[in-house]
Image: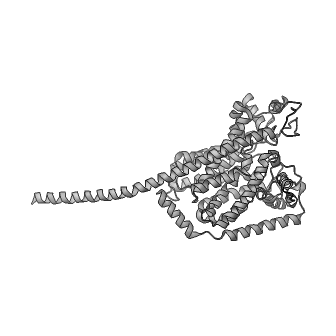
Amino acid sequence: MHRGSELDTARVGSSVVESQAARCGAEDAVAEPEELAESIERQRAGRWLLVVVLVAAVAWALIAFRYLERLAPLTGDEPYYVMTVISLLEDFDLDEANQYAERAWLRFYPPWPLPADWRGWPAFPWELPPHPAQAARPGLYSKHGLGLTVLIALPWAVAGRVGAMATVGACGILLLVQLFWLASEVGASPRLAALLALGLGLVMPIGPYALLLFPEVPAALCFVYAVRRASERANRWWQWLLAGGAIGFLPWLHQRFLISAALLGAVILGRAVAARAGRGWGADWPGALWGVLPALVGGLGILGFDLWLYGKPYQNPADHAGFAGPLGTLNGAFGLLLDAQWGLLIAAPVFLVALATLHWWAARQPQRFWLTVGVVAPYFGLVAAYRVWWGEWGPPARYLVPVAGFAVAPLACWLATARPWQWLIAGLAWSWGALLSVVGYLDPQRFYHHPDGVNKLYRTLDSWLGTQLAERLVPFQPYAAAPPEERLRAALLAVGALLALVALAGPPAWQRVRILTDEKAQRIG
């Protein structure tokens, strides 16, 4: 009796083990194709990402030769970052009084008289007046942010201007990598993600700044990476650390990024607190703390620096031209988009398509979309309120470069399921901006405008095509502003075009997006 019971138990146990083994075998059989599909998808994405990196590197390397030839010597704000670099490298301080007394800028200026084969700027100031901070302490300090100075200091020491340009260019390549992933994460195929990353990254407004000594492209990299990680359900500790570092570095690049950086830091802190309390999503509060700490250090650091330099926890408003009133801010908001010389939509009409498809992104990724709105809206309002909202001496849409990369997300959402005629609309809009960018790359001096209302890029096209496009553009900047009725007409025309594109884009194709997403999820497991 006892022996029979043992035999029965053994049979039952054996059958259970066999059943479990069969189930495990079936699960393994299912898991293997899923893992294989995921591996193939990753390899495909990796190949397209490599294409993005190589194409961008080759394109900017070729363009760099034209920049070095035609944009010599450094002008605009660029030489002032280099003067601070020289002070840091030689004196290990920020007081540039002796650098200006020694006329240190002549070290990166051409010889006098200019060579017979000179191809740089035909006229530039041989005496470089400082851009002083209105500081509370003795000495001569630059009003420009220290972030870019720190980035380019060692490269400048090693390879001069070429090293500094290569550093900003590397930030540009990393930005394109982030744009690739930003597009992929909303459902774009690797090929579409690569197309969008290159298509938006190599042309205006981002492309021309990727080789200039301005903080715009490094800031764009920080913004996109921080938003991606802050809105991701789960991150590894080093991803949190990089995100927090990006947030903390933003106000050091320029203090106009301070409000948006503070919001991003608050989001990461909120995620850590919510996860610690067992709420929220992506319950990884110890990991999120890796993001909180560098963001906090960067934020408190800039406050301490301002206290040291200005005697108060913020930059002296007298360092810049100040802020406009309500009407000036409204003019600045439309000017940032529509100004004849510096307007974003004038230089790159594809951004109007991106604005018209924002609702697609909102439907696909509501959390990331609204976080981006929270970051971009206060920044846009701040620069619109600047008296000098166009950024003065530099390529178009300078102040919008840090947030322009987010346009890949709505475009990716829409184009992933767009019909051929919709692709044609986006393609034509992009092609016009690409054509203008090529006109500028052929002679980079065409990117730069005096505030006279004349766009050199359009004027060059007019000379080639026999058209009068430049005369039809409407200046918003105050030195050559068109009459109010013309600016109002241009604004209404832009709003009408936006509404028409919204109608053509249509509502988000819920079923098509869901099917596409499900199929992709099945492919990658």
| Picture coordinates of residue 317, whole percent (x, y) | 80, 48
- What residue do we see at 50% from left, 63% from top? 519
> Residue extending furthest left?
1
Q: Quadrant of residue 80?
A: top right
| Picture coordinates of residue 35, whole percent (x, y) | 44, 53
Please say whether residue 384 is visible from this viewpoint: yes
Q: Is residue 40 above or below residue 492?
A: above
- What residue do we see at 59% from left, 55% from top? 191
Please say whether residue 300 is visible from this viewpoint: no
User: Which residue is at the front of the view, 237 or 470?
Assistant: 470
In the displayed structure image, the side of residue 51 where residue 444 appears, left or right: right
> Residue extending furthest front?
465
In the displayed structure image, the side of residue 396 where residue 423 appears, left or right: left
| Picture coordinates of residue 242, whole percent (x, y) | 59, 45
* Numbered label tally: 0
**Quarter placement of the N terminus:** bottom left
Colour approach in the figure:
one colour
- What residue do we see at 84% from left, 28% from top? 102
User: Which residue is at the front of the view, 217 or 311?
Assistant: 217
User: Which residue is at the front of the view, 374 or 138?
Assistant: 374
Q: Is residue 279 above or below residue 208?
A: below
| Picture coordinates of residue 296, whole percent (x, y) | 62, 46
